[in-house]
Amino acid sequence: MGTPIYRSVVRYLKPGFFKRASNLLRLDDSAQDREERFRALVQNSFDIITIHDADGTTLYESPAASRILGYPAGALVGRTPFRSIHPKDDERARETFENLASGGDPVAIEFRYRHFDGSWIWLEVLGNNLLEHPGVGGIVLTSRDITERKHADEKTQYLENYDLLTGLPNRGLMLDRVNQAVAHAKRTRERLALMHIGVDRFKIINETLGHFVGDSLLKAAADRIKSCTDETNTIARVGGDEFTIIVPDAARLHTVSATASKILAEMSQAFPGTSQDVFVSASIGVSLFPDDSKSADELTKHADAAMYSAKKLGRNNYQFFTHALNEEAHERMVLEAGLRQAMQRDEMYLVYQPKIDLESRQVIGAEALLRWNHPKLGLVAPARFIPVAEESGMVSEIGEWVLRTACAQIRTCQGMDLFPQIAVNVSAHQFHQYDLSKLVSTVIREEQIAPESLEIEMTESAVMHDAESSVVTLERLKQLGVGIAIDDFGTGYSSLSYLKRLPLDILKIDRSFVRDISHDANDAAIVRAIITLARSLGMKVTAEGVEDEAQLQFLNAYGCEYAQGYLFGEPMACDDFTERLRPRKKRVAS
Ligand code: C2E
Ligand code: MG
Ligand code: MG
């Protein structure tokens, strides 16, 4: 009797059902009986049954629609359901429907639908394309209200992933996020930092002052940690008294140390207790991808280990996993603190390195180079402190001082009837962050010096970093009449098409190429190529770091115009430099 499927279904029905099921499926019913029976089934179904045309317009809704969705009976007919679907689910729902309408297999989908009272309810919808079915001629959707189940799921998911006390992600979710962050950092080749923070002496407080005080201290600690970091960073509570921060954009070690210092300062402030204030401190361990850890697993282990070494070193401090990074972070901290006072304490001064015209062999000017005499560290090289000044935002102030001091020196020379051209180095930050031409024009006017006696030097990478805006800044400088040089040429990546558009006067060949020109064929070829390139672009060339006669002869032979280097003079005090200018009392043609 019946098809194999029919037989297998009825086999599992209880004996009492067997007869009723056979009645239901009886083939000798009249068409009218069957229609009535199915209408009754649909009308009384707990689930919503709707029939749609291929565009989604509702042709029929069962009574459950009005009961579940709250709209007056029949309100859905003649409309498509899409506009009432949650914006986050809408696209997925449309795609699924279109796919079904164009002949796809039956599907199940879950989405949020707007109830008549404005709230969202979750529906689980099964769709079946019966457009070709002679008795139906539409797409049939059976929708079930699963809101309660969804909310229960969300709650379970929250409990699985978040810490109830602080509302922060817990260890499990944090490990997930570290994995994601490492994968992202691998793709983008960015540096990632993981900070592991332990609240010192928490256990003692919890045991002596009670759990209520302990809990409120942890909540307050979480808030303080949050206030010290970027909102986009993940902060997690990974243990009783331990927190972790994932810092995805950690290119600057300095920024990471600054955040750690801020957390230490915040955590050492008093926490209000029930009867008296409570004091704690924190110990922080930092690991870095890819510097000291190659995987998410290593990153977490190393941050943990670094935190324990911070605890061992007496608590209330932070430690990087790698010793070298600790030293670097420490040095930066010392330099930054020192830089803030260096200007007021007159610890900075300029030295001048003579620039020679190779044809006349005369000193025609100098490059002004910054020196810092630190009270404890002694003389600090600019390569060490300029990057710190850039990161801490102090480079503009220092740069302005350099410009003013150099221009004042030009004016002093002019008073002695000497007319050197002095080159001033400008850092990338100074160049891109504020209107350099405005400052230069003010200083030239105030010092009353000829604009051509000043040359502005920028490194190749600073100019090419944002070549389009460099064109504008350099044009403005050019209009003032100052000379413009590209420093360390050959070490960055110049776009030749931009090089052509930039109003440059001088290319300075980097010392690293000049060093070996007399015995390294590649360096010799590079130097020759730079001279040829400069010539074809109407620029002149200064060779940096010329130390011996062989280099000088080579440069002369290929028509290099100017040179600097120990062969002619090391950077020197301004009086010594003025002495070097004395034999030649003619104005320099720029
Ligand atoms: P730079 O502008 O390329 O300066 C040339 C560097 O090479 C100077 O180092 C100079 O002392 C050194 N030098 C010159 N001739 C020779 C030589 O024959 N042999 C060798 N071995 N070295 C030579 P310094 O003074 O340590 O400056 C390093 C860098 O710091 C400079 O490179 C420049 O980029 C930056 N700097 C210096 N002063 C300032 C400043 O006032 N502002 C800014 N933003 N950067 C500065
Ligand atoms: Mg320079
Ligand atoms: Mg240079």
Image (cartoon, rainbow, N blue to C red):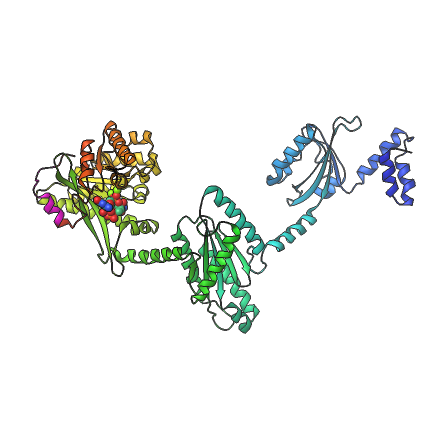
**Which quadrant holds residue 90?**
top right
The N terminus sits in image quarter: top right
> Height in image: 434 above or below 231?
above
Regarding residue 71, the answer to whether it shows in the image is no
> Height in image: 527 above or below 326?
above
| Viewer-proximal residue among 126 and 300 | 300
**Total numbered labels placed on residues in the image:** 0
Where is residue 49 drawn, in percent x and y?
A: 75, 37
> Height in image: 212 above or below 489?
below
The C terminus sits in image quarter: top left
Where is residue 113 drawn, in percent x and y?
A: 66, 41
> Height in image: 266 above or below 108?
below
Ligand 3 falls in quadrant: top left
| Viewer-proximal residue among 499 and 522 | 522
Magenta stretch: residue 143 in it? no
Give me the residue at 62% from left, 54% from top.
160
Regarding residue 58, the answer to whether it shows in the image is yes
Give me the residue at 21% from left, 39% from top.
455
* Region in magenta: 576-587
Where is residue 497 drawn, in percent x and y?
A: 33, 29
Give me the residue at 90% from left, 33% from top.
26
**Which quadrant holds residue 348?**
bottom left
Give me the residue at 91% from left, 45% from top.
16
Where is residue 218 drawn, in percent x and y?
A: 52, 63
| Viewer-proximal residue among 98 and 366 | 366
Q: With 10 as the anchor, is 300 left or right in this view? A: left
